Image: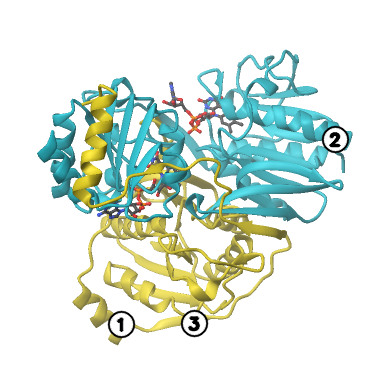
Amino acid sequence: MSNDIFVITEHMDGKFSDVSFEMVGKAKELANAWGGQSVSIVVGSGISSDGFASDSTIQVDDETLNRFNPEAYGKVIEALVKEKSPRLVMFGWSATGMDLAAWLSARLGKPCVAYVKGINIEGGALIVNSQIYGGKMMADVSPEGDMAIVAVLAGSFPVEAGQGSTAATQIASPVLLDGLKIKFVEAIKPAAGDVDITAQTKLVSIGRGIGSKDNVELAEELAKKIGATVSSSRPVVDAGWLPRTRQVGKSGLKVKPKLYLMLGISGAPEHLEGMKGAELIIAINTDKKAPIFNVAHYGSTADLFEVAEAMLELL
Amino acid sequence: MNIVVAIKHIPSIADDLPVKGNNVDFDSVDFVLNEFDEQSIEQAVLVKEATGGTVTVVGVDMIGELDGVLHLALAKGADKAVKITGDDPAADSHQQAKWLAEAIKGMSPNIVFAGVQASNDLDGQIGPMIAAHLDMPYIGGVSSVEVAGDTATVNKEFAGGFGAKYAVSLPMVVGVQASTKPPRYAPISKVRQVAQTATIEKVAPSGESSARLTMKKMAPPVVTGHAEMFTGSSKEVAAKIVDLLKSKGLA
Ligand SMILES: Cc1cc2nc3c(=O)[nH]c(=O)nc-3n(C[C@H](O)[C@H](O)[C@H](O)COP(=O)(O)OP(=O)(O)OC[C@H]3O[C@@H](n4cnc5c(N)ncnc54)[C@H](O)[C@@H]3O)c2cc1C
Ligand SMILES: Cc1cc2nc3c(=O)[nH]c(=O)nc-3n(C[C@H](O)[C@H](O)[C@H](O)COP(=O)(O)OP(=O)(O)OC[C@H]3O[C@@H](n4cnc5c(N)ncnc54)[C@H](O)[C@@H]3O)c2cc1C
């Protein structure tokens, strides 16, 4: 066992995601406290990975790893972790990290903490802060044993602390990558044609509280009155009430409008990821404990339908 | 095709979440089906309708109230329901995944569905852990599944409409984000009818997880900022919002 910290970085089209740098910055701090090394792990093919501030960067390079493949990436990461026995392995709680963190944890029989917002060392032991129950609860947990895996929510640590110029060491895949059961077929691109919500200055955003497809019209009317566009949370799109192009959040689009007027959205972390930078956030939600009220500038616990109807009369 | 859906019964986040000791007070919250499990039940039934086979729903009975959820799944097109009599509301995801994997192993599944995550996945999600225990490939964040022969073609979402299509040799575990079509509605009369006639198979929990977390503290988030709240009748609230928008040149 070592006191090293592995950061499993994520990249897309040669560009590393912010959470990769956030984790590297945090890993440096923890490694200092523990007297170990921070190690950035890059899995891919032909990417330039010399931009991290970690003590070292290991780049596993193989043509098969050209595209994200949870099976291939999982095998590579498992082999590296088994070989070097780091004290801590950090993933992003992202579309890719979510496929790998819990899987690795079960493979190795080591504890895992998801939805991570904070990591501290107290008396040599890890205390991990996790945001669960859709943002309604924070848990401080301590993983037992000599190795832990964490999956970090984007936006938890500063990006700058992870930026640097450590030269990466390229290595060949530590495992054979033939006979994979998962094969990448093709990339999927967003459907074109609809309005681009990331380019709008005003959004009226609706959530599950809108209740049914028929009620979407009310939001459309209100939006029209103030020159806004209707966007939404994920469940509205999953229910087929609006097209995918209108979805704000982690798996949707990131927006930064002047006005974000929210009707019946609870403020789950995955939604916040997409809109917390909006200039003016107004939330209407009947649940006074809805997490959105910790983020919105103005709010009301009135009924969204009554408020929307009354606004229409006044505008 | 043996199609299995692993479901998770979790505290409802629509409720207040009171804390007792170091955890949620499980006696004073309602348990509900994880929202992504509704999607995965639908996806499983869609696959069955396309390829033939049997859908078995399996869950851990955390508080002795899983039957209602299982009846609903049967009313929506599942063929068989199995409950693991765990009866420990504090069992973590690792423990539940172990129990589920043990139960699923005996079902010789061709494809296993699980929700992509649950709001109480403090120690990670069930789907990838079941896959690790069963030594099957896992892909999560999936929003469409088609099965032909012993290959599944799945679409995985990244963000903003970007994603990737993968072909996977079965058996596999799929973490469902959204089903290809929105979940169907089961009329209450049908659920009632199912509840009267269906049998739910009981399985004792087997296997123990060694990966543990010690809970130090659980509490609602320390609020650093809070929205300025508009009070009064809905009409008054609307007037205040309209005034605010006008004052900022936004209406
Ligand atoms: C260890 C590891 C290695 C990886 N290596 C590769 C790799 O070599 N090649 C690879 O393609 N992926 C790779 N990935 C996957 C890639 O990092 C993630 O899929 C990507 O970061 C999306 O993550 P996310 O869903 O968290 O989105 P976020 O990080 O939140 O953001 C994704 C952003 O990128 C945009 N975006 C998404 N896909 C594309 C695209 N195809 N083109 C342009 N913009 C896009 C979205 O609009 C969104 O704004 C790797 C992941 C891991 C964990
Ligand atoms: C990998 C992953 C990616 C995800 N990506 C996204 C994403 O990109 N975007 C996204 O939004 N979600 C995303 N989610 C889903 C996210 O976890 C939440 O489930 C979702 O944001 C909840 O949407 P909601 O707030 O509309 O619904 P709910 O959480 O159900 O909230 C509805 C709210 O409406 C209120 N309400 C009900 N009726 C009324 C009324 N009459 N008047 C006023 N208020 C009312 C309720 O009090 C409640 O707070 C993702 C999840 C996962 C696992």
The residues bearing labels 3 and 1 have C-alpha atoms spaced at a distance of 16 Å
Crowd class of label 2 (few under 14; some 14 to 19; many from 20; radius 10 Å):
few
> Which residue corresponds to mark 3?
B202
**What amino acid is labelled 1 in the image?**
Ala
Q: Is residue B216 above or below residue A18?
A: below
User: Badge 3 sits on which subunit?
Assistant: B
**What amino acid is labelled 2 in the image?**
Ala
User: Badge 1 sits on which subunit?
Assistant: B
* Front: mark 3 or 1: 1
For the residues bearing labels 2 and 1, Cβ distance under 8 angstroms = no
Residue found at the very far left of the displayed protein: A313
**What amino acid is labelled 3 in the image?**
Lys
> Which residue corresponds to mark 2?
A33
Q: Looking at the picture, do discs 2 and 3 lie on one chain? A: no
Q: Is residue A198 left or right of residue A289?
A: left
Chain depicted in cyan: A
Residue A10: in sight, yes or no? Answer: no
At horizontal 74% and vertical 49% (from top left) the residue drawn is A127
Residue B9: in sight, yes or no? Answer: yes
Crowd class of label 3 (few under 14; some 14 to 19; many from 20; radius 10 Å):
some
- Disc 1 is placed on an element classified as helix
> Which residue corresponds to mark 1?
B195
- Quarter holding the C terminus of chain B is top left
Q: Quadrant of the rendered structure where residue A3 is?
A: top right
Q: Position of residue B193 (x, y in %)?
A: 23, 82
User: Badge 2 sits on which subunit?
Assistant: A
Chain depicted in yellow: B
Q: Is residue A83 above or below residue A225?
A: below
The residues bearing labels 2 and 1 have C-alpha atoms spaced at a distance of 58 Å
Q: Is residue A66 left or right of residue A270?
A: right
